[in-house]
Amino acid sequence: MTHGSPDALRALALQHLSPDIAGKWVGLLRPGVRLEAAAGSDDGVGRLGGLPSLPVDVEWPVWNEHGPLSFVASIDCARLPTAALDIDLPEAGALLFFYFDGQLDDGDALVLAEDRASWAGARVLYVAADEKVAECGTPAGLKPYPMVPLAARVEMTATEPWHPSVRAAFAPGAPLRNRYDHPVCSQEFLDALWGFDDEVGHQIGGHPHSVQNPVEIEIAEAVLDGEVPWDDPRLSKEAAAWVLLAQFDSDDAADMMWGDAGALYWLIRPEDLAARRFDRTMFTWQCS
């Protein structure tokens, strides 16, 4: 929902919430790595677009019966400030993100969390530091995105008051996705948060900045095949089992537009991240 320095977010909370509620809310903040276009003097941690370097024995990711995925971004784990995060990222190697973006079929086939048949349309590949790699040309029919080098900074991230973790802290049992009677759901506090920062941005770890409802709930619904009602505690439990791996916003410099100025999200269970099972990531996208 928003990101910033710990002191700024704490000061914002204290302006609109009682000290005890503000302290509890601040305790729910999570560190994330914000990614922005690198200036000349910045240390790059990755890039949007360009051409990926794949292991020599790995083929370009393909969605069967649809075609190859487009390359979105590469993140150099060794350059990330991983020690500052609360997720277990690799200390070296690279994370490569691919997505079937509609170039080959004019957007006819959509990659949707609720459609299991489409899950192959988004992939994360982990390339270990000691693997032999080679830069790959883009498959026929795909135009690579312009390359934009990325720099990183650690910031604290806040999430929506109707997110399962916040709801559990302040109003256990309140309905998912909806407001409830508590100061953290007041229009005054929400307006202050949105006014402080309403940019989705590119990010590794931390709370996702969802364009619509919390993406963790969207993933939980998909994993449970949409068969669990909103008041079923299994949905909240499943949503709490996922953390953000990466989000990539629409970006003019990289000529990336996800729907109507939307964003792409990859989530993973912490135990799968620790075991480097990146094939178990889940993907969704949202736009306004």
Image (tube, rainbow, N blue to C red):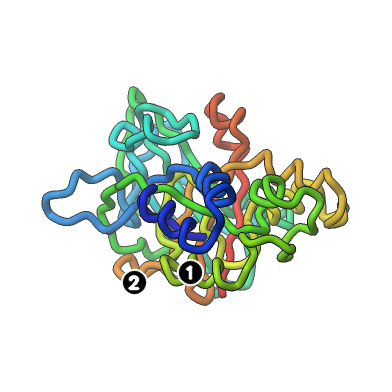
Q: Please tell me which residue is depicted at 45% across the width and 68% down the height of the picture.
A: 198
Which residue, given by chain and number where applicable, does mark 2 sit on?
A: 252
User: Is the residue under label 2 in contact with that under label 1 (CB below 8 Å)?
Assistant: no
Q: Which residue is mark 1?
A: 192
Work out whether residue 103 can be spotted: no
Image quadrant where residue 56 sits: top left
Q: Residues within 10 Å of mark 1 (few under 14, many from 20)?
A: some
Circle 2: is it few (<14), some (14-19), or many (20+) Cα within 10 Å?
few
Q: Of 87 and 61, which appears nearest the observer?
A: 87
Identified at 42% across, 63% down, the residue is 142
| Whether residue 85 is situated above or below residue 239 in the rendered picture | above
Measuring from the top left, give residue 159's x and y in whole percent.
56, 55
Q: Amino acid at mark 2?
A: Asp
In the rendered view of the protein, which quadrant contains the C terminus? Answer: bottom right
Disc 1/disc 2 C-alpha distance (Å): 27 Å
Mark 1, secondary structure of its residue? helix
Using the image, determine if residue 276 lies above or below residue 37: above
Dot 1 amino acid type: Ala
Q: Is residue 127 left or right of residue 271?
A: left
Q: Earlier in the sequence, mark 1 or mark 2?
A: 1
